[in-house]
């Protein structure tokens, strides 16, 4: 309820509501105090009173970044990448600001500053982390943040997503270079990446216990989106996995690729150099695999089941493969249609001239 009292030459209004912070304000005129009191009572009934600004004055952005890094990022599979982003960010002057002082234009200025130094994709990744940071602070840490200051940042510019596919002869060059690699697992790893579309981290995380030879399937537990998936295995994929098992000597169950991510990366770079290919990432093999799935005629749900995409709109990146398949189907259907018409119209056309006519 609202209480209005005279304090000197002004009218003071105090609004209290159970479960919410009491707010007060002073006015020169009583009618202005009454209007404001009614407005605040309506907001109190909706549990929508303005937040306590003193709660945001007690914390700096650095406090939130450090807490997020140590409690939230530490639980993610991409902790190393977020640690690499957040730790240098703590030294930026923006982190010394109080939360009550931060506005969207502050982060817009920081975005423009970073765009002069790094690519837009790098700034987008950092902005996504900061956006999630403020959501966690509001929803889980109880800070009265009414609007996410990073939520409405815009990033203009061309799409930086890679569309690289294997060019003719490149896969043979890679496999030939992998055969001479001291790491015997690189050859089947490259083949599996093209055959299944698995990411590098997913390949390194698969275990012998994840294989189901009876059902020709493989369970991928450590995925990018955190949800395990089961992918079907072709005969070639099973043969490649068998090659992995025979390429190393093991005494018990364990990882199929017992190598660190850095060792795998270094081997991949040496193979590329030996094959004479410079502009190819290992992740491009996944793009190649998914494009091939569409070219084989698989539907979007079928490809999503194999690739693990939760949002099927992400598969629109591979419309070039679908477009080529659609064109081939159109040409095939058109040829069959023309052949059918010719088979039907030809005899009729001939008989119309050969049959006798009563008028003549």
Image (cartoon, grey):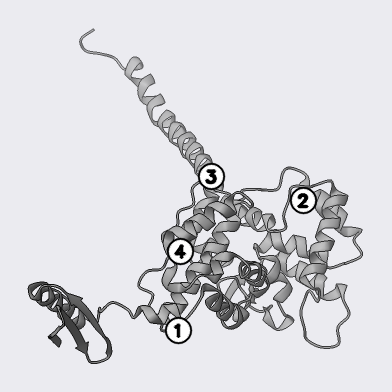
Q: Is residue 335 above or below residue 89?
A: above
Kindly report the distance in space between the C-alpha atoms of the residues bearing marks 1 and 4. 18 Å
Tell me whether circle 4 and circle 2 mark residues in contact (CB < 8 Å): no
Task: Decide which of tag 2 and tag 3 comes sooner along the chain.
Answer: 3
Quarter of the image where the C terminus is located:
top left
Disc 1 or 4, which lies upstream in sequence? 1
Task: Report helix, strand or loop for mark 2.
Answer: helix
In the image, farthest residue toward the bottom: 18
> For the residues carrying marks 3 and 4, which lies nearer the camera in this image?
4
> CA–CA distance between discs 1 and 3?
36 Å
Where does the image place residue 92, in percent across and percent down from the top left?
60, 65
Residue under numbered circle 4: 150
Query: Nearer the observer, disc 2 or disc 3?
Result: 3
Label 2: how many Cα within 10 Å (few below 14, some 14–19, many 20+)? some
Image side of residue 75 versus residue 20, left or right = right
User: Dot 4 lies on which element?
Assistant: loop
Q: Name the residue under label 3.
A: 158
């Amino acid at each position: 309820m609202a209480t209005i009292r005279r304090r000197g030459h002004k009218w003071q209004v105090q609004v209290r509501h159970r479960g919410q912070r009491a707010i007060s304000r002073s006015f020169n005129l009583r009618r202005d105090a009454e209007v404001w009191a009614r407005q605040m009572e309506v907001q109190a009934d909706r549990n929508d009173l303005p937040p306590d600004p003193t709660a945001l004055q007690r914390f700096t952005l650095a406090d939130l970044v450090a807490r997020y890094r140590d409690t939230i990022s530490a639980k993610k599979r991409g902790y190393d990448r977020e640690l690499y982003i957040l730790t240098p960010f703590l030294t930026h002057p923006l982190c010394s600001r109080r939360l009550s002082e931060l506005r969207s234009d502050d982060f817009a200025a920081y975005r423009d500053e970073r765009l002069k130094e790094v690519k837009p994709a790098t700034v987008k990744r950092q902005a996504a982390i900061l956006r999630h940071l403020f959501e966690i602070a509001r929803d889980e840490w109880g800070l009265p943040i009414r609007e996410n200051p990073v939520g409405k940042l815009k990033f203009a510019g061309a799409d930086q997503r890679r569309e690289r596919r294997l060019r003719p002869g490149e896969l043979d060059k890679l496999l030939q270079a992998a055969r001479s690699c001291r790491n015997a697992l690189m050859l089947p790893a490259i083949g599996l990446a093209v055959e299944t579309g698995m990411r590098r981290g997913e390949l390194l995380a698969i275990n012998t216990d994840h294989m189901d030879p009876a059902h020709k399937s493989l369970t991928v537990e450590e995925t990018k989106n955190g949800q395990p998936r089961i992918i079907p295995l072709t005969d070639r994929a099973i043969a490649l996995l068998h090659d992995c098992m025979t390429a190393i000597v093991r005494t018990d169950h364990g990882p199929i690729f017992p190598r660190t991510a850095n060792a795998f990366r270094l081997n991949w770079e040496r193979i590329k150099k030996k094959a004479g290919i410079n502009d190819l990432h290992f992740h491009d093999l996944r793009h190649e695999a998914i494009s091939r799935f569409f070219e084989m005629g698989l539907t979007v749900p079928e490809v999503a089941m194999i690739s693990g995409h939760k949002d099927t709109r992400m598969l629109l990146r591979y419309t070039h493969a679908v477009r080529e398949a659609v064109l081939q189907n159109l040409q095939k259907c058109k040829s069959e249609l023309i052949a059918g018409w010719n088979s039907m119209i030809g005899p009729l056309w001939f008989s119309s001239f050969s049959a006798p006519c009563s008028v003549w």
